[in-house]
Amino acid sequence: MRLPFLRLAPFLSVLTWGLITSAPTASAQAIQLHVDLTDAPRNIYHAKLSIPAKPGSMTLVFPEWIPGNHRPSGPIADLTGIHMEAAGKPLAWQRDEIDMYAFHVTVPEGAEMIEVSLDSITANTSAGGGGPAASSNLLDLNWNTVLLYPQGANSDAVEVAASITLPDEWKFGTALRSTKISNKNEVEFTPVSLTTLVDSPLIAGEHFRQIDLGVSLDRPHVMDLVADSDADLAMKPEDLAAYKKLVAETGALFGARHYRHYDFLYTLSDQVGGHGLEHHESNDSAGSERTLLDPDLHFIEADLLPHEFAHSWNGKYRRPAGLATANYQQPMIGNLLWVYEGLTDYLGDLLAERSGLTTPEQYREALANTAAMLDHRPGRTWRPLEDTACSVQILRMVGSQWSNWRRSLDYYPEGELIWLEVDSIIRQQTRGRRSLDNFLRNFEGGESGPPKVVRYTLDDVVHALNDVASYDWATLLGERVNSTGARAPLGGIEGHGWKLIYNEQPNLLEKAVEKRFKTANFAYSLGFTIDKDGKLADVIVGSPAYQSGIGPGMKLVAVNGQKWSPAVLRSALKAAQRTTQSIELLVENAQFYRTYSVNYHEGEKNPHLQRVDGQPDLLTKMLAPLTK
Ligand SMILES: [Zn+2]
């Protein structure tokens, strides 16, 4: 194994700048945690803990409510091989009969420590999602999946001295600072609070690369990449420049950083799932294996790292009061997720464009796609946006079927539209002197410093907006999140001098998605989206397909007697424009086949943004980078 010397460089520079004055040693009250990761390729991690204890009854808990997931997603079913002992004698433990995450044990007289060993089974779909994930070549370690801690403790007050053993020749990246790298693949980390540990995941792999993204506002930034092959790690010079610009743009936008150093942990793999999870001093993001090489994947995933990076300000530093909990057993309240995630969705797309990861045209095509999807969401007639945020616990894992009627995690994309509208109103109210950038700088910026959480309520958001531009923000935001109605809030697009239109031209984002993932979107014409195997992912209530009797989950087999493909369906749509005959769809519904006649003659409809004549183009102003 090549020692990850590069990991030490930022640590040394941090010391030089006095942000950490000495490498702290663990106190006697610290939990010692060692994680053996050498079995990662066969999808299991082994952990050993020494937990300070006092004689008598004690309850240890496994983290349940995971920050950034906003729900009780701690992978308790994957916690296995639990063994406890004290003073060399095995201890009988008992799981709580109601709370599956709690374990009761009696500590014998004279014992000051419980030794716990446990295993965590990794999933191959959860990289960047807060769970453990591994493949033959790489791993993602979220510390919350390999530890127990005393019930009722505040995670800020629990100290953990963590160490790992890596598979031979694997290198790692994390925002944690290592005190000792010895014996080839053993790494010890500077003791930290449980909060910081859980907030500092680690990725490792056989194919690893660290890229310096520069110092901005006195903070060093690096990107740690792991992939399934060295070829996947080849970053183009223009991407390197864009990621450096991303760092600079956040400095210019927020004017402060709430971390001591920052690591982009970026996994490129088709083996372990693709998610992103925000942290104060890092983000744990997983993209497709060829994201750096393939222009379509690059476009599709362009906002991932900007989104997760923006969370360091919006979500980690400024956090809705209901999501700022004392430990991982306390339930979270998601009602303000349209700020936490919605504003971050706005920022992710904006920062991707301002840093050059996307072009202005790509930004507009992605926005048109979002707006069209939300404008074809009949579920909004019964479910207000805030209910999608409060329901994150039950909506996060549901499939695509009937998502137009159920609604999904709409606080993400619809939040983006709301914040776009807020920006357009600020620009109009202040005659272009101010924008949402001013709100972001005031609300999310402040003083630079180490990670900390500053809670907010909706009132705080309204006050901060009024400091930037006087307006009845409480009424506007209240209507946007609490009312029901068929149409999406498109006022932000219109206020910026553009409008949503549909035509035959393919939407650039949809085109890239169709090419790479073999799905197809006919939502705005026939009224359905199709998975790569022909299965109808969703059928929009009230659409021509819906009226013919078709539903999601059925599988499209043939169009007008010809085997289905996106091209065949497009030809049929074109032909139907010149006739009154219905389009005949042969559909497989489990064991049965049936032909449905869809009476539709308006051709393909794909979403785009078009300039409104005579109105100023505020969108292009908004997209302009703040740095050269
Ligand atoms: Zn997010």
Image: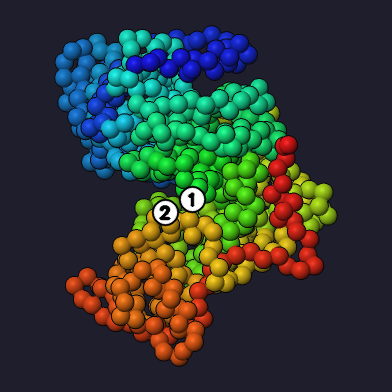
| Mark 1 C-beta to ligand 1 under 8 Å | no
Q: Is residue 480 visible?
A: yes
Instruction: Specify few, some or many for label 2: CA neighbours under 10 Å numbering under 14, 14-19, or 20 or more.
Output: few
SS assignment at label 2: helix
Quadrant of residue 189 in the image?
top left
Mark 1 — residue? 296
Which residue is at a point 66% across and 33% down the rendered structure image? Answer: 248
Q: What amino acid is found at the position of numbered circle 2 in the picture?
A: Arg
Q: Is residue 387 visible?
A: no
Is residue 209 shown left or right of residue 397?
right
SS assignment at label 1: helix
Q: Nearer the viewer, residue 363 or 444?
A: 363
Mark 2 — residue? 516
Q: Is residue 341 above or below residue 521?
A: above
Q: Is residue 14 above or below residue 226?
A: above
Which residue is at a point 56% across and 56% down the rendered structure image? Answer: 366
Instruction: Specify few, some or many for label 1: CA neighbours under 10 Å numbering under 14, 14-19, or 20 or more.
Output: many
Q: What amino acid is found at the position of numbered circle 1 in the picture?
A: Asp
Mark 2–mark 1 Cα distance, whole angstroms, equals: 7 Å
Q: Earlier in the sequence, mark 2 or mark 1?
A: 1
Is residue 6 shown left or right of residue 64?
right
Q: Which mark is residue 187?
A: none
| Mark 2 C-beta to ligand 1 under 8 Å | no
Q: Nearer the viewer, residue 54 or 386?
A: 386
Quadrant of residue 73 in the image?
top left
Which residue is at a point 61% across and 53% down the rendered structure image? Answer: 363
Cβ atoms at labels 2 and 1 below 8 Å apart:
yes
Q: In which quadrant is the C terminus drawn? A: top right
